[in-house]
Amino acid sequence: MILDIVHVALWEPEIPPNTGNIARLCAATGVPLHLIGRVGFRLDERTLRRAGLDYWPAVELHRHTTMEEFRENFPGRLCCFSAHATIPYTQARFRPGDCLLFGSETRGLPETVLQRHAAETFVIPMPSGKVRSLNLATAVGIVLYEALRQLNIW
């Protein structure tokens, strides 16, 4: 594990292959993964295992029933990501202990979370304007590697 340099959290993920791919990314980088709220599938579902292959045992996985429970157990800074934000993720200055928080595939993050963390809510620019959002696993990969780069992990 990378000494808790950064964490990834998913709010109510809905699509098993996305979560499986993110779990694999977390296993590859040594980053803890937090699943918050209602997960739209069973964690032992065959599709999820296939997407995560045999990497699930290598993932430091934390489950939180509510956002409040997550915040009680994770007092660090949240960096939120939303297709509706205005600050590009490249302007974020990541710090050790940050948690990269991503919303569900269809609903994103709750408005209350976005309002509470407005100064730390970022977007991955999509200049073509031809799509609403990126795939969740792709978005996590883009931001996680930028955070690790900034923190001089490798």
Image (cartoon, rainbow, N blue to C red):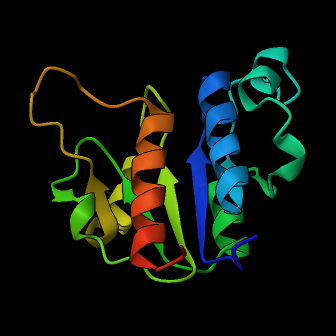
Question: Residue 55's quadrant in the figure?
Answer: top right
Q: Does 64 sit above or below residue 151?
A: above
Q: Give the left or right position of residue 146, taking residue 99 as reference.
A: left
Q: Give the left or right position of residue 105, taking residue 32 as reference.
A: left
Question: What residue is shown at x 62% (from left), y 80% (from top)?
Answer: 75
Q: Does 1 sit above or below residue 136?
A: below
Is residue 109 something one can see in this rendering? no
Q: How many marks?
A: 0
Question: What residue is shown at x 27% (from left), y 60% (from top)?
Answer: 89
Pinpoint residue 126: horizontal percent, then vertical percent: 17, 37
Residue lying at the far top in this picture: please name it: 47
Pinpoint residue 109: horizontal percent, then vertical percent: 43, 45
Residue lying at the far front in this picture: please name it: 154
Pinpoint residue 41: horizontal percent, then vertical percent: 74, 23
Is residue 78 something one can see in this rendering? yes
Question: What residue is shown at x 39% (from left), y 75% (from top)?
Answer: 150
Q: Quadrant of the N terminus?
A: bottom right
Pinpoint residue 85: horizontal percent, then vertical percent: 22, 51
Q: Does 76 sit above or below residue 71?
A: below
Residue closer to the observer: 114 or 149: 149
Residue closer to the observer: 124 or 11: 124
Residue lying at the far left in this picture: please name it: 128
